[in-house]
Amino acid sequence: LRERWLGRVAEAADEAALEEVRIAALGKKGEITLRMRELGGMAPEERLRVAPVLNALRDELAAAIAARRAAFRDAALEARLREEWIDVSLPARPRRAGTIHPVSQVTEEIVLIFAEMGFAVAEGPQVEDDWHNFDALNIAPDHPARQEHDTFYMARAAGDARPPHVLRTHTSPVQIRAMQERGAPLRVIAPGRVFRADYDQTHSPMFHQVEGLAIDRDVTMAQLKWTLEEFLKAFFEVEAIDLRFRASHFPFTEPSAEVDMRCSWKDGVLKVGEGDGWMEILGSGMVHPRVLTAAGLDPAQWQGFAFGMGIDRLAMLKYGIPDLRAFFESDLRWLRHYGFGA
Ligand code: PHE
């Protein structure tokens, strides 16, 4: 009996076959089990002789089955390990990662430079009410600047009680919101999208500006000039810069100045700070007293300077990009050509 069952355990080809052997020997109706049940009907001396032998056989068989099952499991694991190995020395498949869009990158550069000068970032809505976009900035309803801005007006249903809204034509309304929300003194820049109905090589109906505003008790135009010089030197990564303040007019600043930067073009490469060319780069001025009043500040106590410039234009100059519209076409070949797309 012993030889036969140990032989069958040894012959079982896999775990399933082994389980069949176990049931046939040790299951409820297994041969060994039935033999043990017969012990009850035996004479006492015979039972004393047979019982220990059967018990030992049952334990030996159970142990043999368990050992064989463990061997099957080890072998299966080994086979799996052999099959599922990974060659960690293989070179990785090339994967293209996304990169930052040039406009986002330039915005980040600008924010960082101004952050070092103590300017916080302020924001306002792109759909703006006409009071913030125009009236509060001293642009009255009949002011010609309203036409010059080629404004996109939001459609209005008859009887709409809300004030007229526009797609903001510049970031200057954020000046008003920042003064209303934060009071004075104040130093903020406001980068963001602006909209004008205009489209050619240097105009896109959506483009980006960054507004700057500093309000304090004794703000002067000299501080405006210093701030812009420091910013432009850092942005264009040059030691020296030469700026020309040209008298100009904006309704929300008085006096107002457009700022040109000395530069030269050599073989399509812009050199900043040298040469005999001038490039207009921004509008600026001292905050008009009426703007301070509209935003809830007393012009007898506070003065400020403000400036606004085109982020896309700065990006074009810094990276030698000729067509503004390409920024907004999402052409990966173009982005890669300028080193931005991966
Ligand atoms: N908002 C003006 C523009 O869009 C720029 C500007 C900002 C001028 C702040 C002066 C002061 O052209």
Image: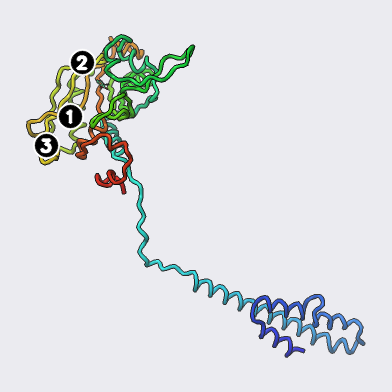
Q: Quadrant of residue 201?
A: top left
* Residue for point 64% across, 78% down: 14
Instruction: Classify 173 as above or below 118.
Output: above
Q: Nearer the viewer, mark 2 or mark 1?
A: 2
Q: Quadrant of residue 206?
A: top left
Question: Percent position (x, y) of residue 45?
Answer: 89, 89
Q: Residues within 10 Å of mark 1 (few under 14, many from 20)?
A: some
Sequence-first tag of 3 and 1: 1
Q: Is residue 273 left or right of residue 256?
A: left
Q: Nearer the viewer, mark 3 or mark 2?
A: 3
Residue at mark 1 = 229
What amino acid type is highlighted by mark number 3? Trp
What amino acid type is highlighted by mark number 2? His
User: Secondary structure under badge 3?
Assistant: strand
Q: Give the alpha-carbon distance from disc 2 to disc 1, as whole Å.
A: 21 Å
Instruction: Classify 93 as above or below 307.
Output: below
Q: Which mark is residue 249?
A: 2
Question: Percent position (x, y) of residue 183?
Answer: 36, 18
Q: Give the alpha-carbon distance from disc 3 to disc 2, as whole Å.
A: 28 Å
What amino acid type is highlighted by mark number 1? Glu
Residue at mark 3 = 265
Query: Are the residues at dot 3 and dot 1 in contact (C-beta closer than 8 Å)?
Result: no
Q: Nearer the viewer, residue 5 or 154?
A: 154
Q: Residues within 10 Å of mark 2 (few under 14, many from 20)?
A: some
